Amino acid sequence: MKTMIITGASRGIGAATALLAAANGFAVIVNYRQNEAAAAAVARHIRAAGGQAETVQADVSREDDVLRLFAETDRLFGRPDVLVNNAGILERQMRLEDMDVLRLNRIFAANITGQFICAREAVKRMSLKHGGRGGNIVNVSSVAARTGSPNEYLDYAASKAAIDALTIGLSKEVAGEGIRVNAVRPGFIYTDIHADGGEAGRVDRLKDSIPMRRGGRAEEVAEAILWLSTDRSSYSTGIFVDVSGGR
Ligand code: NAD
């Protein structure tokens, strides 16, 4: 059985990915930062359906937590085959003039430092060079990496553009070591992240800017993540799959 670590999997896109991956035969590590009860519910749901799942607490922006997340995975399921770098945050909408450095540091720590250190620990375990059996890394970027999110989330968009550069560069760095590195770019997806960003109804407000005239569902993003996590995408690395209704 292959093992998948999904960061930030207690809700939203991460939880949808955990359920879909488990239904497709992966043993899943449901990482969460704070919401232990929600993560436990995801794992329970998977086990009730006959799948395998364990929860592991870790703040991905903290190196010591990430080291523990991977050590726990090694102990529970052995070397991971897939890392889904999904955890990410938004903060309240504002213009650049109002953004302080503490906020910028929080956004970059969660969204990009977290993906870097998780990817590093995954490569150490997956690389054929280090005695691993290869694997897949799927980074969750955003359409915002290209649109820039003016007037609301410049910081978030910049962190997502950094994820794109990580995806391209790392995909080339480890292509000869049995590891593929790809990304999904969700558009406007109905999850609680928008409430955290200060506007729960944001997806509906922006619906008319989406060619398909509707927001996306977390499950639709999970399908793209699953494709990039399996041999069904075996000749693709360094690519971006937009799940954005044509945006
Ligand atoms: P969400 O808020 O429901 O999920 C994000 C999860 O990440 C949460 O469970 C949160 O607790 C966790 N998390 C945040 N910081 C963490 C940290 N430091 N350590 C561990 N976990 C942490 O939102 P979502 O929409 O499911 O977001 C998932 C990913 O999709 C994010 O990277 C987000 O930026 C990206 N995304 C979402 C949308 C959208 O419209 N919903 C669009 C583009 C990209």
Image (cartoon, grey):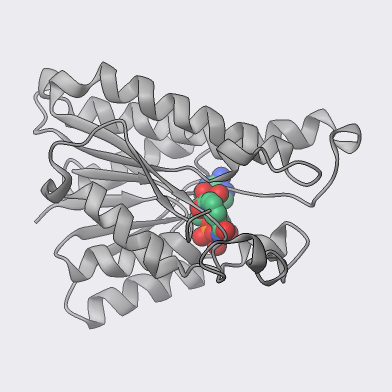
Image vertical order of residue 162 relative to residue 9, above or below: above
Tell me which residue sits at (57%, 60%) in the image: 188
- In this view, the residue in front, 127 or 244, is 244
Count how many numbered circles sit on residues in the image. Answer: 0
The residue lying at 38 percent from left, 29 percent from top is 167
Q: Is residue 224 left or right of residue 210?
A: left
**Which residue lies most toward the right here?**
97
Q: Position of residue 120 (x, y in %)?
A: 35, 26
Relative vertical location of residue 32 with respect to residue 150 in this rendering, above or below: below
Quarter occupied by the N terminus: bottom left
Image location of residue 54, percent across then percent down: 30, 62
Q: Position of residue 16 (x, y in %)?
A: 38, 67
Front residue of 41 and 246? 246
List the single residue furthest toward the bottom: 48
Left or right side of 71 for 161: right
Does the image show residue 10? no
Query: Depth check: 170 or 10 in front?
Result: 170
Q: Farthest residue toward the front?
A: 211
Which residue is pictured at 33% across the width and 77% down the height?
Answer: 44
- How far from the left and from the top, in percent, is residue 219? 38, 69
Residue 98 quadrant? top right
The answer to whether residue 223 of the structure is visible from this angle is yes
Q: 66 or 8, which lies in front?
A: 8
Q: Which residue is drawn at 35% across and 61% down?
A: 222
Which quarter of the rendered image does ligand 1 occupy?
bottom right
Establish if 125 lies above or below 217: above
